[in-house]
Image: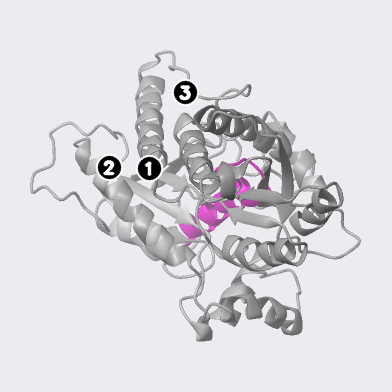
Amino acid sequence: MTRPSGADAPAAQPLAPYDAVLLLSFGGPDGPDDVMPFLRNVTAGKNIPDARLEQVAEHYHHFGGASPINGQNKALLAALRAELDARGVSTPLVWGNRNWAPFTLDALTEAYAAGARRVLAVVTSAYSSYSGCRQYREDLWKALDGLAAQVAGPGADHPLQVDKIRAYFNHPGFAEAAADALVDAFAQLPQDGDGARLVFVTHSIPTTMDEASAVSGASYTDQHRDVAAVVAATAAEHLGRTLDWDLAFCSRSGPPNQPWLEPDVNDHLRALDAGGTRSVVLAPIGFVSDHMEVVYDLDTEALATAAELGMTAVRADTVGVRAPFVSGLVDLLLERAAHERDRSAGRLLEPGHVVGDLPAWSEICRPGCCLQRAGSPSGVPAACSADPLS
């Protein structure tokens, strides 16, 4: 648990009523021996044979068996601690993952042992969908069940409450950090990237999941397009030029007969090449940090495709620990805490700050939000929701 650098905490906590913050992420292996157990955790319940997992494992072994996401999360944890300290917020931070140590249950156990009873979560996924929202909330509920069993026995009430900040793809801090990274990437191209095509990239998901995500207010695809337009316009203003852009996808998995979002980034590069495009900037707008889908699917595979085509290609940074993003996350923590105090007092909530055309996302997930298939609840409960089973 990270605590403030100063010796004394302020009398009134700006994050009240919350007494701990949880950084909740996907997780990744720390070394070669972790890779297969990690992949089995990721695919638990999907009946995927080890032979298929071993193919995916090669992506990790290409980088020595360790995922960069762990170092990225440690850096983000430290950056959040520094920003909270700078604002006089002494609330402790804990870190937990869905699929590898430290697990979500480990983090909640640590927070509970330190006296926390209300925890505010920051998920390292900016968008609203099953894989980016509800799957994390299901993991939270499972961890809360586990903590309850430790504290009072199986079936006991949850001993602490976990809420989360809203989906933040259209928060100004995320958009500003992504635009800054884009400007830096264009600076790496010859002649400042004149004529280069901008390709935003995100993780593909099944089309049924994309359709289901629209229950939240806009589909996963539309969320990306909304913020991509803002990021491209902001970067274009800094660069003093117009930027033509597209949205492509990476990291498709699942059975071949299941439709997923397209175009794949490699197919899209080939289409651009056929149309005469000679240089591209790949912007991983769907990812907060440089985890495996970025360093393998983009840095290894997509850049290799571009090289084969004779195209000049640069990959922009993820938002990582850029100052606008970290500051924006702390703004969102403070916003959520203020809204919770306002709810308790019966006051009207101040609207959240956004960029683009879409409104601020709901902090409390609506019934039917982020299912794998619209109108088909799985019966698996999820935290941070008005109805955990819907």
Mark 3 lies on a secondary structure that is loop
Please give the residue where the numbered disc 1 appears in the rendered image: 326
Tell me, for residue 83, which label it has, or none. Answer: 2
Give how far across and how far down residue 170 sits, in percent: 55, 31
What label sits on residue 353 in the rendered view? 3
Q: Are marks 2 and 1 in contact (CB under 8 Å)?
A: yes
Q: Quadrant of the N terminus?
A: bottom left
Taking depth in this image into account, of 17 and 85 the one nearest to the observer is 85
Name the disc covering residue 114, or none: none
- Please tell me which residue lies in front, 154 or 127: 127
Circle 1 — which element?
helix
Rendered view: 90 above or below 232:
below
- Region in magenta: 126-146
What scheme was used to colour the molecule? one colour
Label 1 crowd (10 A; few <14 / some 14-19 / many >=20): many
Kind of residue at badge 2: Glu
Can you see residue 367? no
Residue sitting farthest toward the front: 191
- The earlier-in-sequence mark between 3 and 2 is 2
Give the image location of residue 102, x and y in percent. 41, 67
